[in-house]
Amino acid sequence: MITESMIRGIGMTSQRTRERLVKRLVEKGIHDLRVLEVIRNTPRHLFVDEALASRAYEDTALPIGQGQTISQPYIVARMTELLVARGVPARVLEVGTGCGYQTAVLAQLVDEVYSVERIDVLLQQTRRRLRSLKLTNVRFKHSDGTWGWKSKAPFDGIIVTAAPSSVPEALLSQLAVGGRVVIPVGQQGGAQQLAVIDRTEAGFEQELFEPVSFVPLLGGES
Ligand code: SAH
């Protein structure tokens, strides 16, 4: 759990800027109080380069190096809200760790997070960052997340923060019955849409939500 004193201890004194962000998210339609509370408590400025820290509480994506971005807070909140809407999943697979902001949000809501990233430098930084925030219920893996994380499956929830052109089969097969996947789907540069896929006894049910813009889900490791 990230406490107020930890946030103060690491230099984040402006509760007000975070309150403003939360207000903005409410205006944009986020209403899950559990998600809003976690966003209120998560020091996003520690997930970006110091030079960008002053912009950390704007509702916008920012560069994190290696050609990648930290997702816009609205999108993190929206995807998390969709993931927990039918009940908070216990074990969650995240594909696309990046700087770990979404990971940190999840770690404060669910029991266990398994996060996979293909760029090793990002993964190492994020591992340290989450450790210093005392978020200890996260396991990381340097791998191509298209394959999921078979030895830890099945998962009650899967969240993908890079966009494939279609939903990878392996992810669907690693989803527990009753579980849910939240994933952006579509061609890079073309239209992407947020998709929610539920696994029921009978099979898979998909629902589409708003248009989004993510970096592509790439194959291989780097
Ligand atoms: N979740 C982050 C945003 C990550 S950006 C946040 O909270 O802001 C997307 C990330 O997905 C990048 O770090 C990128 O390297 C990673 N990625 C892209 N394709 C991947 C793949 N096949 N497997 C694992 N990670 C992948």
Image (spheres, helix red, strand yellow):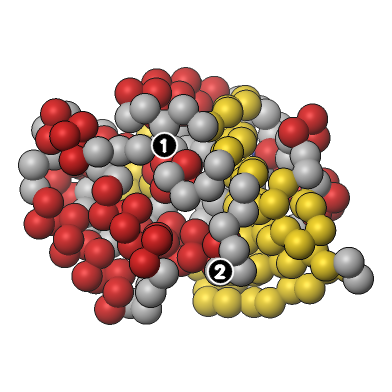
Residue pictured at 53% horizontal, 47% vertical: 110
Q: Amino acid at mark 1?
A: Cys
Measure the alpha-carbon separation of dots 2 and 1: 25 Å
**Residue contact at pointers 2 and 1, CB within 8 angstroms:** no
Q: Amino acid at mark 2?
A: Ala
Residue corresponding to mark 2: 85
Q: Quadrant of residue 11?
A: top left
Side of 198 where 79 appears, left or right: left
Residue 56 or 202: which is nearer the viewer?
Answer: 202
Q: Which sits in the foreground, 97 or 185?
A: 97
Q: Which residue is mark 1?
A: 99
Whether residue 165 is visible to the viewer of this picture, yes or no, is: no
Residue 145 occupies quadrant = top right
Find out if the beta carbon at label 1 lies less than 8 Å from the nearest ligand 1 atom: yes
Mark 2 CB near ligand 1 (8 Å cut): no
| 4 vs 212: above or below | above
Task: Report whether residue 84 is seen.
Answer: yes
Where does the image place residue 134, in percent across and percent down from the top left?
A: 37, 27
Q: Name the disc covering residue 130, or none.
A: none
Assign a secondary structure to mark 1: loop
Q: Residue at x 28, y 78 (%)?
A: 27
Residue 54: image location, x then y, percent:
14, 45
Relative image position of residue 108 (x, y in whole percent): 43, 45
Residue displayed at 47% across by 42% down: 107
Image vertical order of residue 75 relative to residue 130, above or below: below
- Mark 2 or mark 1: name the one nearer the start of the chain: 2
Return the residue nearer the eye: 104 or 111.
Answer: 111
Name the foreground residue: 48 vs 44.
Answer: 44
